[in-house]
Image: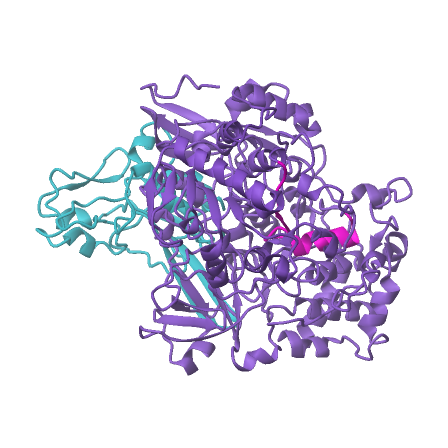
Amino acid sequence: MQVGFYFDQTRCIGCSACAVACKDWHDIPAGPERWMRIKYNESGRFPNVFVSYLINPCFQCEDPVCIPVCPVGAISKRIEDGIVIVDSEKCLGNIECDSKCLKACPYDAPQFGPVKGSKMAKCNYCLDRFSEQKLPVCIEACRSHALDAGSLSHLREKYGNIQKANNFIYSERTKPAIIFKPKD
Amino acid sequence: MENSEIGEKEPKIIRTTTAFDCGGRCPLRVHVENGKITRVESDDYHVEDEQLRACLRCRALRQYVYHSERLKYPLKRDGPKGSGKFKRISWEDALSEVARKLKEVKNKYGNSSIFLATGGGYLGALHDGMFAMIRLLTQFGGFSTHYGNVSSEGAVYATQTQYLSPFVGHSRTDLLNSKLIIMWGWDPARMISGSNTIYKLIQAKERGIKIICVDPRYTDSAVILADQWIPIIPGTDTAMMVAMAYVMIKEKIYDNDFLERFTIGFDKFSDYVMGKEDGIPKTPDWAAKITAVPAGLIRNLAREYASTKPAALMDCQGPARSAVGELYNRCAMTLTAMTGNVGKRGGSAAGGLMGIPYGHMFFSSRIPPPKRNPVEEGLISVRGSLDLQLRFQARCHTNKIFDAILEGKKGGYPFDVKFAWFVNNNFLNQLGNTNKAARALKQLDFMVCSELWLTPTAKYADIILPVTSAAERNDLTRPWPSGPYFTAMNKAIEPIGECKSDLRIAEELADKLEIEDFQKYPDELKALKFLIKLREDTRKNIRDIDEFREKGIKRLDLEQPYIAFKEQIDDIEKKPFETPSGKIEIYSQRIAELNDPDNPSIPKYMERWEGRYDPLGKKYPLQLLSPHPKNRVHSEMFLVEWLREVDPHVAWINPVDAKPRNIKDGDEILVFNDRGKLTITAWLTERIIPGVISIFEGAWYDPDENGIDRGGCVNTLTKDAFSPGGASALKSCLVEIKKFNGGA
């Protein structure tokens, strides 16, 4: 099984309730370590403006490139659900290995705290909630109901298989587990 | 009641809510372990589409409650006023000092020199500091206070004029019955307007309902909702609305039958619109020059609005928070009558307040004071009157509080303030002209502040009393304007430090003031039961208080969505409007009798001051907007880092305005006028109409040694003035900007 996300970009107001809920649930202080980020895009000229928001958690790629680049094998992909997890005991920290995982990831999913030598941490699909059959906290935090999660095949049945969205490039190499209703 | 569960080791989920002045009211599930909040979740109602999902603010509740800057002990000033230097004192000493000072001022100057400044910082029935202090000071012999709510007084005045009722809203679900929604100066993505409003609008759009946004900014609401964005120069909305009326009259596409049956004064309005009154026909071409909206767009919108039934014209309160004030809502309401959309399913009566009378906070119960405020005894009643002067018999306007403190009776105010109590507000930061406010508070004899934080206002206090947050209280709360539901606040944790609730402070102070008949409510559960019984809507709907508190919410099942004035439109003979004429008053005799040329008896376009065409624009050519922030509630939650990091404090500037001033994206700029100077980061965006900059309100005032506000508090620049209808005119403000290179 491969889990994934669905994001309806036409509904997202960029409010960041998902990002704050994520920090609260995982008890992450304000600062550079952001498991959920919102990317902003603006184009056009007044008054013909186009604006979009894009969620950016770890997309739990089907072929995660962070795994092979890790010098100590601290990152792995769970066979049973495809969730990409990191063993912080093994992780060397961002100085010793020069943040190889972050550099490899096309979506900047690996995150580090403000302290030098911080161990990598990232969106883990709310593993603790997942084990209780609950969706990641960001999903129910969304005031616009723009997010969904679950098995990627179920999501495809429900929402189709659009792999593009504004301000997003689908990586054929890593195969991010996300489908969209894009804003255009 | 003591909650025996608190402090237990077993993890608990407490269903509760908060009482912020945010526009929503969301059920929360607060996880508590070992007496500490560990996580916050929101509504889990089984009908997912009807959930009332908390926004980012309450998602950050834990960081707010446990913030290191929260005040934990009573403080006494230990340095010059405003220096922010305080020392910890005991409650005994703090309350004794406050009581001593109250008695001294009362004896020396009389009760009218005791001033109570109340805001919307906590909207609960039992522990609201406003209710508690009103009751205490009334029984102490009275107090002076202020009139006019900062948010919506323009809309209040307008709806009092035309409907004589503030309940102009529909159930949010009724948006789905509309065929066209015009959002005019309304951004519920940020200012909430009901917990689920943005989602109802999304559902409306996805049903194919066309949504048009008229706004100087391409708001986050417009980003996802707008089929069409019509940018407009701030303060000129009424010119466009009047021109839309012109098109409807000229092309005879208005609902004459509706106007004849349900309104008075359309003939006079029509004379003004067509130019019979002043020789100026209010054509789309006339309006285009004023509004920057092309005449063709105005014409099309008028036709589309008049021919699409039902259609909901949704004005709000922001554009009325200006010198134009009430005229904006009055014009919008007039258009809703001209198109026959009042009282109709899928329509809208406009008026900007959006409230429905089910669970509305206006009906909040409170422990009633045993008598009227003696300082206001014997005054002429203001009920139903549109004469602001009656409001000023004993009070000052809210946006004039600091001027009144400075000028007193010699400045024409009805009192000289010698003692001021600030509760539930950060008014120095949140009213017009912050520098003047700082001057006023520096020279004020004695000031008490009930607060959770050392706010820019609290910094000037002589005594600060630390109060508990919603997480530390049991209470009964209501959704802001938009039920239909009631929410229960259930204490999740013990008070932080030595914090007390405002109710307890009033009770303890009553002893020190020797007010022997001050009613106390030591048993919270008993008090909540009493408050539920006090109002018909809670009495009828909350039968089982234990069940209510356990669920944290009582939803009402309305058979049909609530529609404002449906009863009147269905049968006007049986149920006339509350106005003197029994009809919608496009023309107001009550206003005509005031004989104020600046306050017209029919809605009009007027320029008033500090708009685009004020001659002051030569010196200060940019209009300044100060909309609601999304990541704090006004100035509340400002210090919460989880919220700060998701939306850095920036000024929206169109590149057209930035370029000639050599300002680049990310530059630090100085924004200034004769009232003040502030610094802020420039954010260049095409989302704002040229000639306008926008700074979200609520950032904390932080003046440096040169008097430049380095905190970016927008009210450093705004004016402490109000419109003829009493709107706090914070959005009529002209400024200039330049790149900031340090120094003055």
**Chain part drawn in magenta:** B141-164
- Outermost residue on the front side: it is B108
Which of A75/B297 is in front? B297
Q: Quadrant of residue B491?
A: top left
Q: Position of residue B589 (x, y in %)?
A: 85, 58
| Residue found at x 54% / y 59% | B406
Q: Which chain is cyan?
A: A
* Relative height, residue B135 to residue B209 (above, below): above
Q: Is residue B152 one of those drawn in magenta? A: yes
The residue shown at (56%, 37%) is: B133
Would residue B38 be visible to someone looking at this image? Answer: yes
Q: Position of residue B313 (x, y in %)?
A: 69, 56
Please determine whether, in this image, residue B506 is positioned above or below residue B681. Answer: above
Q: Is residue B363 above or below residue A64?
A: above
Residue B467 visible in the current orientation: no
For residue B700, which quarter of the picture? bottom left
Q: State the image coordinates of residue B662 (x, y, percent, origin top left).
A: 38, 80
Q: Is residue B215 magenta?
A: no
The single residue placed furthest to the top in the displayed view is: B4
Q: Quadrant of the C terminus of chain B?
A: bottom left
Q: Please provide percent x and percent y for residue A163.
A: 38, 53
Looking at the image, residue B481 sits to the left or right of residue A72; the answer is right
Left or right relative to B53: residue B517: right
Name which residue lies at 60% across and 80% down.
B615
Nearer to the camera, B269 or B725: B725
In the depicted view, which residue is nearer to us: A85 or B458?
Answer: B458
- Chain B, colour shown: purple
